[in-house]
Image: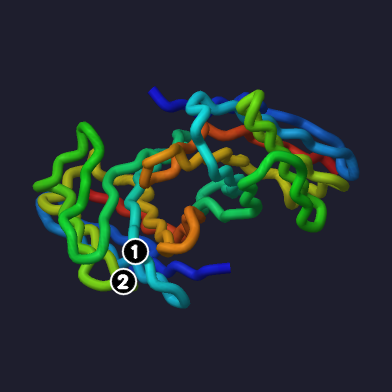
């Protein structure tokens, strides 16, 4: 069964710190990887996509992909209280249609 | 980023009635649309996948006769909850994907309350 695993948290970091969110996936043939942010009571919002090994940076966010280890991570630099949300890792499996989502990691940034 | 709208944003209906939720991709053509349901403090649950002009594919355990999905065009999909019951009360979210990437963009969701 295809799975995406995330630590549910909560992950608590002080304002200004780096938050590190991790995700592992089971299907080695997966090619596309995504991070979504979901605020309480709202729908998910796509914040990062990554398709090849290495790092991809967008503002304060850096996604990291290691296909050999089947591992995806999201770093949030200079964390702000407004970053407090649930972060969902999603993977597009080979020959799959719908993304497979992890259960999400709750991040809490304290001021 | 791509924009997906949903209407209505919230709806209250009486038990036994039907409710239709619309999902539109506003600035791209969505070859595939997805419907999710999310209960409070729980994970997203995929209900069905629909491709334009084709019948929807429902996930195991989702009643296709109760949750009717129509993907009539490349920009519009609808979910009709038929004969709604209080246990159908939930947050229903659609998402859309263009044919060129695997990125899925979510609508703002519809909060359904069945009394």
Q: Residue at x 29, y 45 (%)?
A: B89
Percent x, y of residue B43: 45, 35
Where disc 2 sits, the SS reads loop
Near-viewer residue (A60 or A12): A60
Near-viewer residue (B5 or B76): B76
Percent x, y of residue B84: 16, 49
Mark 1–mark 2 contact, CB under 8 Å? Answer: yes
Q: CA distance from mark 1 to mark 2?
A: 6 Å
Chain of the residue that carries numbered disc 1 in the rendered image: B
Q: Quadrant of residue B60?
A: top left
Percent x, y of residue B9: 39, 64
Q: Residue at x 77, y 44 (%)?
A: A55
A110 shown above or below B105: above
Indicate which disc, 1 or 2, sits on the residue closer to the N terminus: 1
Q: Is residue B14 visible?
A: no
Q: Residue at x 55, y 45 (%)?
A: A32
Where disc 1 sits, the SS reads strand
Chain of the residue that carries numbered disc 2 in the rendered image: B
Question: Residue pushed farthest bottom?
Answer: B27
Q: Which mark is residue B43?
A: none
Name the residue tied to disc 2. Answer: B74
Q: Which mark is residue B31?
A: 1
């Amino acid at each position: 069964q295809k799975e995406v695993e995330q630590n549910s948290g909560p992950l608590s970091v002080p304002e200004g710190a780096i938050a590190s969110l991790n995700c592992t996936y089971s299907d080695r043939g997966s090619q596309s990887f995504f991070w979504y942010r979901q605020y309480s009571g709202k729908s998910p919002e796509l914040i990062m996509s990554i398709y090849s090994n290495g790092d991809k940076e967008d503002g304060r966010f850096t996604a990291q992909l290691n296909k050999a280890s089947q591992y995806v991570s999201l770093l949030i630099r200079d964390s702000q209280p407004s970053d407090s949300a649930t972060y969902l890792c999603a993977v597009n499996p080979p020959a799959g249609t719908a993304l497979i989502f992890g259960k999400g990691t709750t991040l809490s940034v304290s001021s | 980023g791509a924009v997906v709208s949903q209407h209505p944003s919230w709806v209250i209906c009486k038990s036994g009635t039907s409710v239709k939720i619309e999902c539109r991709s506003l600035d791209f053509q969505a070859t595939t649309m997805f419907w999710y349901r999310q209960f409070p403090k729980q994970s997203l649950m995929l209900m069905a996948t629909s491709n334009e002009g084709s019948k929807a594919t429902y996930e195991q355990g989702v009643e296709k006769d109760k949750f009717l999905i129509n993907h009539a065009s490349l920009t519009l999909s609808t979910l009709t909850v038929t004969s709604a019951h209080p246990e159908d009360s939930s947050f229903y979210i659609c998402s859309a994907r263009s044919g060129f990437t695997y990125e899925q963009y979510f609508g703002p969701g519809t909060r359904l309350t069945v009394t």
